[in-house]
Image: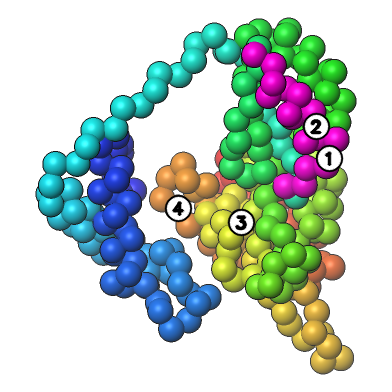
Amino acid sequence: MLMDWLASQDVVPLVIATIRFFAAHGDRENRRKARLRHVRERMGDEVFTARLREAFEQTRAEKDWPVATLALAKLDHPAKQTLTFANGDVSPAMADDLAWLAEDEATLVRLDTHHRVVLFGRSEAGLKEKLDAAASLSSAANLAVSVVACPGKRWCAHGLVDTNSPADVIRRRFADKLPAGTTVCISGCPNGCAHPAVADIGLTGRIIRDDAGLKIDAFDILTNGGMGRDERLAKPIATKIPAKDVVDEIEKITMKHMKSMK
């Protein structure tokens, strides 16, 4: 971990230091490796953390950075409901209902990470009443398994494999099997935009050849990442698993590693 906490006035120098650090040490030859996490993997955690902290201290010492004033959180909306949209898909009806909620002074609508939108209300009962009236959001309010999937080859030019199909199967099969709080992250290529490298369970898409020599979708599987709660990177546990077998493989891994997952 780089540091336990960060003063608001240090955010800008840390961002600038990180950009400079990546410019100096990032891979400019291979676009697939042009990620800060690859610099960390190459240097190792101890060296990476020490050198990035040194860059931060040097940048912070360059001048007196402005003090950022953070707005106080609104205390009149204590009720909270998280909506999780499968595959990040928001239908027109869902968008209409979100807009309707946003126009109501009694409800705050805020975007979150991992395909989520968070609603805040003045009371639990009032927020529930609003959600009951927004029928299209029912599935998002009751999604049992958190699966984060990039668009995959459906929309992304870099996507190698389909990500939505395995994501849908995982949600159905593991609705009552995964430990509370477990997040599955699925990326359609090694770029890792869905962050499988830090996931509780991560899938990274790749192409392999089957016994007949035909190209097929496949995944590498990683487990036990920190999900940003700590510095842990997920560890590779299976490679080149055909897409048709990947959910069965996850079930085996889940049973074996249940105790180590949070």
Q: Quadrant of residue 110?
A: top right
The x, y position of residue 258, in whole percent, is 65, 46
Q: Please give left or right for residue 180 compared with residue 163 in the image.
A: left
**Real-space CA distance between mark 3 and mark 2, rounded to the nearest whole angstrom:** 27 Å
> Which mark sits nearer the N-terminus, 4 or 3?
3
Q: Looking at the image, is mark 3 or mark 1 nearer the viewer?
A: 1
* Residue 93 inside the magenta-drawn segment: yes
Q: Residue at x 21, y 58 (%)?
A: 55
| Main SS of residues in magenta | helix
**Residue 29 sits in quarter:** bottom left
Circles 1 and 2: CB atoms closer than 8 Å: yes
Badge 4 vs badge 1, beta-carbon distance below 8 Å? no
Q: Which residue is mark 3?
A: 194
Disc marking residue 92: 1
Q: Is residue 225 above or below residue 76?
A: below
| Kind of residue sitting beneath label 1 | Pro
Tell me if mark 4 has few (under 14), some (14-19) or many (20+) residues whose alpha carbon lies within 10 angstroms of its own.
Answer: some
Span shown in magenta: 88-105
Seen from the viewer's position, the closer of residues 11 and 242 is 11
Mark 2, residue position: 96
4 or 2: mark nearer the eye:
2
Disc 3 and disc 1 in contact, CB within 8 angstroms: no
Q: CA distance from mark 4 to mark 1?
A: 38 Å
Which label sits on residue 232? 4
- Asked whether 179 or 205 is in front, the reply is 205
Type of amino acid at the residue the image marks with label 2? Asp
